[in-house]
Image (tube, helix red, strand yellow):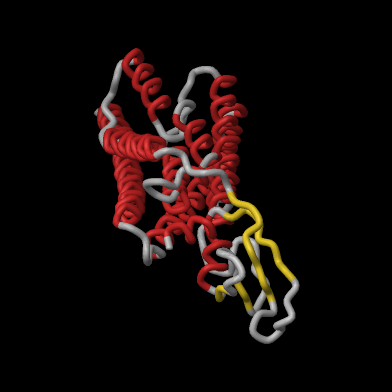
Amino acid sequence: MRKLEKLFFKCTRWQVEETTDLINCPYHYFCDSTYQEDYPPVIDFLVVLFVLASFVSATVFTLLDFSRRPLSCADLSIGRLKRRYLLPSGPIALPLVVLILANGQRINTMFSLSHIGPALLQLVYISALAFRNRDESDIKYSVLEASTVSAILHASLHLDSILVAYYTGLAALRESTFSGLCLSCVCRKDALVVGGSLVGYRGWSKATVLTAIALCSRMACRIFREERFSLVIRLAVEAISWVFVTEDSIDLLLGIADWSLLDLVVYGGICALLFLNFLRMAINLFAFMARKTGHQAGKQMDLWVHDVEMQQ
């Protein structure tokens, strides 16, 4: 059964044949070509370590961001440099994410990347939205943001190439009957749709587009200077991006039916990381409002003292 599932899920082209049984088998399909053989288990193990390290990195920096203490300029620059290169959306990890997803069909020995791949992409979205690049040079900042947007779009397309084959094979396996003419020969009542008729996650989604737009809006505000109107637009786009990323993550968690315990832990961890980020943003917002209120109260107190002194 395991071999049969691999054949269906790794199929790149389903060929339809003419049939004379228009009642029981109006559509007859067989797999014409598949992806190459899987990588050895050590590659799968390295991918698991990379995903775990990326998740731990994003979680640690989220927790550290709960309490922002005043730092010297030197310490702050070093901190930013370290964080940028350790994040899943950074210039080191993100190209590796693209490389992993580009070869995802061959990473299928210990686990299936069609199950873990969406979580990896969601982790990149969360990291890109939660942590901003803060280089002094506008040119360097623009290059980093543009490369991040490009890598996210490429990663989503590579993930779709994995998911389309998976969901097409899943539909062929679950919604068809075997004809017995070959290992992959199936009969169907209706035509086989690319991507399958079963509802599933797509890498190229609203969350992908809005995350890319949010990063572009940050870049535009940095280059052309941030005013009140542009700030409102940027914050609105980022808020909508967070909503769609959260919606996709919850749908992925609730959509787990016959997946393994690893899948449940992975998507539960993604939802927990989202909760931490929302909590962090709420705490920072309340702290900002408290500082602003205290600053205004201090100004009013100074004016009152000044009026009293003038009256005396």
Q: Quadrant of residue 264?
A: bottom left
Viewer-side residue, 194 vs 109: 109
Q: Residue at x 51, y 52 (%)?
A: 240
Q: In this rendering, would 59 be left or right of 135?
A: left
154 up-or-down from 1: above or below: above
146 up-or-down from 293: above or below: above
Q: Residue at x 53, y 57 (%)?
A: 7
283 up-or-down from 165: above or below: above
Residue 88, image x, y percentages: 42, 35
Residue 296 appears in view:
no
Residue 252, image x, y percentages: 42, 59
Viewer-side residue, 224 vs 22: 22
Viewer-side residue, 202 vs 14: 14
111 up-or-down from 309: above or below: below
Residue 258 appears in view:
yes
Q: Residue at x 57, y 72 (%)?
A: 180
Residue 269, image x, y percentages: 31, 49
Q: In this rendering, would 221 be left or right of 15?
A: left
| Quarter in which the N terminus is drawn | bottom left
Image label count: 0
Residue 251, image x, y percentages: 43, 62
| Quarter in which the C terminus is drawn | top left
Viewer-side residue, 303 vs 20: 20
